[in-house]
Image (cartoon, rainbow, N blue to C red):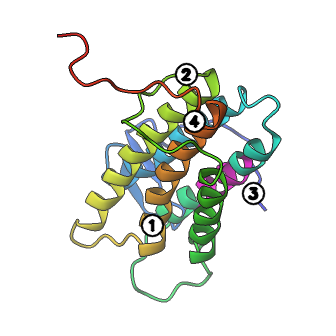
């Protein structure tokens, strides 16, 4: 169980932070950037939930995703060194990716077919989900870059989860736009 009695420790005043496994890293470290961006995406999912109103099914999915994003943050904050640990670190599991895929399929089955690219607009819920999607894509780019860095490991399931999450958020944004009927479509060259 997590217990936070004191919020400030002053240990980060020198520009470093502790990973779950103990070592300190600069706050500008790519691993810290990656899990910080996952946290940002999580906050934006929470903001989107303020606009889901009568969309209880979608809100339930988003609540599960928020919990998963804490799991992903814990995964990233506990580097896999390839060595045996005294404890089992929390890692994203393939089942979490599979669940997201099923939820994408569930929502997508009700959508109007796409006729053009969709602008990130429409209802407040849709617009907020699009913002969360773009931040999830940034987290994905950071996680991929981290995994390509010598000595750093990012699990395949973690990468798959963040990739699928942005797909989910795109489909959810369309679903929140009256199941695609209220999508705002891109009209190429319209304002030339």
Q: Is residue 104 above or below residue 173?
A: below
Query: Mark 2 = which residue?
Result: 122
Magenta stretch bounds: 63-71
Circles 2 and 3, Cβ within 8 Å, touching? The answer is: no
**At x 47% / y 61%, what residue is drawn?**
76
Circle 1: is it few (<14), some (14-19), or many (20+) Cα within 10 Å? some
Circle 3: is it few (<14), some (14-19), or many (20+) Cα within 10 Å? few
Q: How many numbered circles does the render carry? A: 4
Q: Which mark is residue 160?
A: 1
Q: Which mark is residue 178?
A: none
Q: Nearer the viewer, mark 1 or mark 2?
A: 2
Out of 138 and 39, give the one closest to the viewer. 138
| Label 2 to label 3: alpha-carbon separation | 39 Å
Out of 93 and 134, give the one closest to the viewer. 134
Callout 4 secondary element: helix
Q: Nearer the viewer, mark 3 or mark 4?
A: 4
**At x 56% / y 42%, what residue is drawn?**
112
Q: Which mark is residue 180?
A: 4
Residue 34 position, x and y percent, is 40, 51
Query: Mark 3 = which residue?
Result: 2
Residue 95 position, x and y percent, is 63, 75
């Amino acid at each position: 169980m997590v217990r936070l009695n004191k919020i400030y420790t002053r240990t980060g005043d020198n520009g470093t932070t502790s990973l779950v496994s103990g070592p300190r890293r600069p706050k500008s470290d790519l691993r810290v950037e990656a899990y910080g961006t996952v946290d940002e995406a999580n906050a934006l999912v929470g903001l989107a939930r303020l606009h889901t109103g009568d969309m209880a099914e979608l809100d339930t999915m988003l609540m599960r995703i928020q919990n998963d994003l804490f799991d992903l943050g814990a995964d990233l904050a506990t580097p896999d060194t390839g060595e045996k640990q005294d404890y089992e670190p929390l890692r994203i599991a393939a089942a979490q990716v599979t669940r997201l895929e099923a939820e994408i399929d569930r929502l997508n089955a009700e959508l109007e077919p796409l006729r053009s690219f969709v602008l990130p607009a429409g209802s407040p819920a849709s617009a907020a989900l699009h913002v969360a999607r773009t931040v999830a894509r940034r987290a994905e780019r950071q996680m991929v870059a981290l995994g390509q860095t010598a000595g750093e490991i990012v699990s395949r399931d973690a990468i798959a989860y963040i990739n699928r999450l942005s797909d989910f958020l795109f489909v959810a944004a369309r679903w929140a736009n009256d199941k695609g009927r209220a999508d705002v479509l891109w009209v190429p060259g319209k304002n030339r």
